[in-house]
């Protein structure tokens, strides 16, 4: 199983960035896949998840209206379009996948994790 995240970088506040996560090794259509982040000295938190088995989508309240998650089943890839970014969005972003997470957005329901990609938002 592999989850390869990319697209991180330095962006100014108010700008945009798109993260990608290419996955392999499991049946993409049967899994929930999502984005989590961890800022320095903070706990990891869910950002957005999509359950490919039923189409359910979850967003963290602080990113609603600014971030959009999408899934390309033909490419086994999910994306996180990040608009109107803020300095508090600065973190290492991880993609993760789970076959049957009890609640979208919680880490413990995700079985597989990729290496993170750093997003830095300057003010």
Image: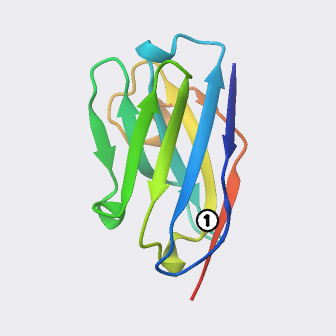
Residue 3 vs residue 69, the one in the foreground? 69
- Asked whether, in this view, residue 53 is left or right of residue 86, the answer is left
Residue 17 vs residue 33, the one in the foreground? 17
Residue name at image x 52 percent, y 49 percent: 36
The picture places residue 120, in percent across and down from the top left corner, at: 65, 72
**Eyeballing the image, is 65 above or below 88?**
above
Residue name at image x 62 percent, y 25 percent: 23
Does dot 1 land on a helix, a strand or a loop?
strand
Residue name at image x 33 percent, y 28 percent: 102
In the rendered image, which residue does mark 1 sit on?
A: 91
Say which quadrant the N terminus sits in: top right
**Eyeballing the image, is 69 above or below 13?**
above
Q: Extreme bottom residue here?
A: 123
Image quadrant of residue 38? Answer: bottom right
The picture places residue 7, in percent across and down from the top left corner, at: 66, 52
What colouring does the structure picture have?
rainbow
Residue name at image x 48 percent, y 48 percent: 80
């Amino acid at each position: 199983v592999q989850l390869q995240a990319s697209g991180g970088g330095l962006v100014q506040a108010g700008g945009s960035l798109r993260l990608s996560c290419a996955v392999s090794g499991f049946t993409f259509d049967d899994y929930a896949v999502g984005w989590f982040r961890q800022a320095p000295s903070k706990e990891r938190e869910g950002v957005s998840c999509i359950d490919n088995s039923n189409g359910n989508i979850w967003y963290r309240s602080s990113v609603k209206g600014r971030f959009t998650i999408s899934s390309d089943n033909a490419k086994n890839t999910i994306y996180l379009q990040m608009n109107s970014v803020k300095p508090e969005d600065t973190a290492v972003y991880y993609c993760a996948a789970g076959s049957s997470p009890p609640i979208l957005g919680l880490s413990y329901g995700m079985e597989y994790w990729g290496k993170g990609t750093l997003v830095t938002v300057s003010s």
